[in-house]
Amino acid sequence: MQGRSTVLVWLRKHGKLDWSKSTYITDMPKSKETPAQKIKRLEREIEDLRLKDLIKDEMINIMDEEYGAGLRKKYISELSRAQKKNSK
């Protein structure tokens, strides 16, 4: 590239942007959610995650009791092995 004039010539020839109307990042639409609404939404999401976690725990307990699967023991031993690898 030869210099600044080359860029200006290219912009004048090929540029399609209307330079009279500048757009700023602040012109972006803002969230229509108020802080109180956001807090309520996040609290609902947390409660949903807690319920999902509770259901998963119950499923694992039932599998262990009825089928002797030992899923919790297998998961805990795999988790401890993974932690040992990460600590090295």
Image: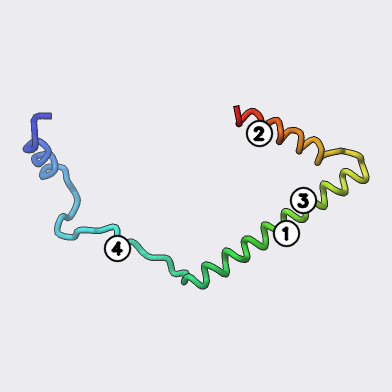
The N terminus lies in quadrant = top left
Pointer 4 residue: 27
User: What's the distance in space between the residues labelled 3 and 1, CA to CA?
Assistant: 9 Å
In the image, 43: left or right of 51?
Answer: left
- Observer-side mark, 2 or 1, equals 2
Q: Nearer the viewer, residue 64 or 32?
A: 64
Element under disc 3 = helix
Contact between labelled residues 1 and 2, with CB atoms less than 8 Å apart: no
Pointer 1 residue: 51
Earlier-in-chain disc, 4 versus 1: 4
Judged from this view, the residue extending furthest toward the front is: 88
Earlier-in-chain disc, 3 versus 4: 4
Pointer 2 residue: 83
Question: Which of the 4 quarters of the picture holds residue 3?
Answer: top left
Kind of residue at disc 4 = Asp
Q: Could you say where residue 16 lies in the image, as x and y percent from the top left? A: 19, 49
